Image (cartoon, rainbow, N blue to C red):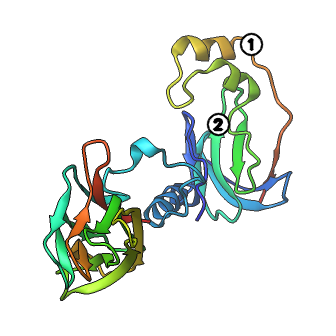
Amino acid sequence: MAYQSWSVSFGEQPSAAKWNIIGTNMAGFNDGTAIGTNAIAAASLATTAITLGYTQITGTVTLTTPTVDTLVTGLTQAVTIPAGSRKIKVSAYCSDFHSSNVNSSSNLTIWDGTVGSGTQLQSWAHISGTVDSDGLGAYLVAIVTPSAGAKTYNVGAKASAGNAVITAASTTPAFILVEAI
Amino acid sequence: MQTKRYQIKCLDCGGTSIIEIWGQDIVHWINTDQVISARKRLDNQWGFQCFCGNNDIMTTQEKRTIDNPANPLPQEVQQIIENIKADAPKFRMEPQ
């Protein structure tokens, strides 16, 4: 129930009905109905209210001929999924992802659990050119609704030929980000 | 102790409640259908509060003079009672 303004003056003799407004307000704070629109300021949110985990790498990772999905070293994030069935957004970014060979396909993937044996949540594909193997920036997002509890999300990569190159530097970190949205 | 029963009627919404006044200033709530609070004000009249929002628990003079309505300063009270200013009533007390 919406919040009702409440106060008493000296000498006032409130009835039980007036006292019970306090209880109604408290019940409203418990279920959120008494919290005003736009009332929760950013500073009042816990740091883990939205961002459940973030991990970045600042050095390029090269996976040697990963013909099957293989963990990108360092891009793993363990989180605790909160109760309440909110959607979870898992994002992965790399400024330049490619196979080291020309004419080769490569995939960057997001996984719930172990790369290759867990559950793949998203995939981003790149095919290198016929002359050079320059890559593209990759940004992939998966939206899921997992049960509350512990989870580990991972970024994987594979290439049909050659090495899989996940470029990262201090000025262009590659990262995995897990958010409750 | 003298006891008198009244029906308190809100002049805004027409809602009522029944109270007994024991002695000079003790309120005993018989029911609280609509009027939910009462107070013997410094002008020696009764003020009330209704669920609809109608409220004369404090006079205009009290609200203007008293900084903390829950705990007024003695000098604030003195200032009021030395020069009482009445408001038009917002409720009607009807003896039962």
Secondary element at tag 2:
strand
Query: Does residue A119 appear left or right of residue A136 in this picture?
Result: left
Rendered image: mark on residue A57: none
In the picture provided, is A5 more to the left or to the right than A153? right
How many other residues sit within 10 Å of disc 1, few (<14), some (14-19) or many (≥20)? few
Comes first in the chain, label 2 or label 1: 2
Q: Nearer the viewer, residue B81 or A22?
A: A22
Q: Tell me the residue that label 1 is attached to.
A: B83
**Which of B16 and B60 lies nearest the eye of the viewer?**
B60
Q: What residue type is labelled 2?
A: Lys
Q: Is residue A9 visible?
A: yes
- What residue is shown at x 21% (from left), y 86% (from top)? A118
Q: What chain letter is assigned to the residue under label 1?
A: B
List the residue tagged with mark 2. B40
Q: Which of B39 and A114 is in front in this view?
A: A114
Q: Residue at x 66, y 18 (%)?
A: B65
SS for tag 1? loop
The mark tally for this picture is 2
Distance from Cα at disc 2 to Cα at disc 1: 17 Å
Q: Mark 2 lies on which chain?
A: B
The x and y percentages for residue A28 are 51, 62
Residue A14 image position (x, y, % from top left):
56, 50
Whether label 2 touches label 1, CB < 8 Å: no
Give the residue furthest to the front: A131
| Discs 2 and 1 carry the same chain letter | yes
Q: Which residue is drawn at 52% across and 60% down?
A: A20
Judged left or right of residue A162, residue B43 is right
